[in-house]
Amino acid sequence: MKPLSLHPDRLFSAEADQRAIARRLYQTVENQPIVSPHGHTDPAWFARDEAFSDPASLLVTPDHYLFRMLFSQGVSLESLGLPRLDGGPSELNPRKIWQVFADHYHLFLGTPSRIWLDHTFHSVFGIDRVLGSASAMEIYDTIDNQLARPEFAPRALFERFNIEFLATTEAALDPLAEHDLIQASGWSGRVATTYRPDAVVDPENEDFSEGVLMLGELTGEDTSTWAGYLAAHRLRRQYFKARGAVATDHGHPSARTENFSVTKCQQLLEGALQGKLSREQSDQFRGQVLTEMAQMSLDDGLVMQIHAGVVRNHHQSIMTQFGRDRGADLPAPVNFVTGLRPMLDRLGHEAGLTVILFTLDESSYSRDLGPLAGHYPCLRLGPPWWFFDSVEGMLRHKRSVLETAGFYNTCGFNDDTRAFLSIPARHDVARRIDCRHLAELIAEHRLSEDDGVELARLLAVDLARDAYGLASSST
């Protein structure tokens, strides 16, 4: 069996002077708290604080990074325990699921998933052997035995990881019962929800009409009218805000926004509810709602996050068999300059509005995102997302946007993960890459090392706190 260890200089430059600088910078941020204002972990974990059931359901089944790679190599999703929508057979034995994962663990060499998992195995569970076919059951038992111990319960791990703030993400119709339980429990951990209205904003979602009807029932508003539809969103946003929400999240195929008349908006809503909109009209509707959501964010103070440049659920048969969000999202071109202009014409000068932009379209980094954030007071840049929250992806992002936007028009790092145990690893990777990049600038005399120390701290925690309006727990 291969030994597993984590090199103290991992991810730093191979150039000796830069590596030494990066090492010094990293020592100043290594133990800073984790601020995670955007993610997809399950709030029930923290509400109930029950032991995680087994290694497979904790580390494999929820992580679309993992089963996406495995599927690309011919591993069936059924063998990984993903349930079929038609109730067909799917593997239920967590040991068998783990063995399949271990048999193919070599596929992740060179990927961020391998970095995060090795970090989790070694730092969280004290494992000193690389996962593989021969070591699979021994490592499974090691993890399984530890998960039964109180110090591996969700809240204990939250505190061990030094998480200052963690946001989950829930749909607009979610009752948020778990967040109510967290608040009522008296636990000091800061876990908040995030308002994600996509299903009742996208006319191409198969549940759109039913969802908009339910939105009206929940709020007592007539959501068949444009005024009632917007009022219902405002009420739900307040419901989420009362449960700790600091942000909204919007996953759109494009960055399109609009400024239509009320009459035009009513026509689009009626067509959407009747399922009669063309693809172009559906995009118009989404674009108008995005502008309205920005206005609401200005009014209620919730930070607006826009994830654009992605074709979601690209693999139709996977969506049909297993549902949405099963690892088949792919990058697509997006034009932020043209798309955001209607919203920016209306609200771009508002310093009281914060809109954070994320994309899978790397080509837009230097062309669109850097210049836009370098001008409009309301805009900040999110970190590289999904395919690009990796070593090379992070470096490309920094080298593309920072000279134009500057450090202070970014929001640091948020991990955007469903895999709870990967959070410390992901933040550690981000901090190491930040220090590597800063060390390069310092070695080239483009920054002083004193400035590098300050920026390393900002990138690790303070920019996220500022962007999302989070006061430090120490203040």
Image (cartoon, rainbow, N blue to C red):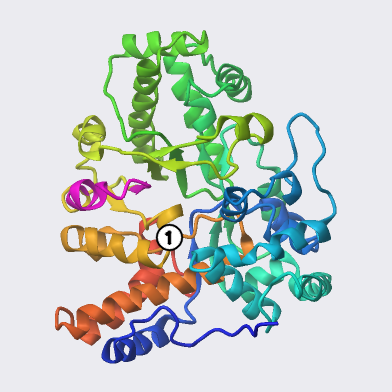
Query: For mark 1, what is the residue?
Result: 389
Q: Is residue 165 visible?
A: yes
Q: Is residue 184 above or below residue 448?
A: above
Q: Position of residue 286 (x, y in %)?
A: 39, 25
Q: Is residue 280 above or below residue 327?
A: above
Question: Local crowd at mark 1 within 10 Å, few (<14), some, or many (≥20)?
Answer: many
**Identity of the residue drawn at 49% across and 81% down:** 31
Residue 40 part of the magenta-drawn span = no
**Identity of the residue drawn at 45% across and 38% down:** 251
| Residue nearest the viewer, comparing 348 with 3 | 3
Q: Is residue 25 above or below residue 273?
A: below
Q: Position of residue 317 (x, y in %)?
A: 61, 30
Identify the image quadrant of residue 183: bottom right
Q: Is residue 25 left or right of residue 270?
A: left
Q: Position of residue 241 (x, y in %)?
A: 52, 44
From the image, which quarter does the C terminus lie in? bottom left
Type of amino acid at the residue the image marks with label 1:
Asp
Q: Is residue 167 left or right of residue 150?
A: left
Q: Is residue 378 left or right of residue 37?
A: left
Q: Position of residue 186 (x, y in %)?
A: 70, 61
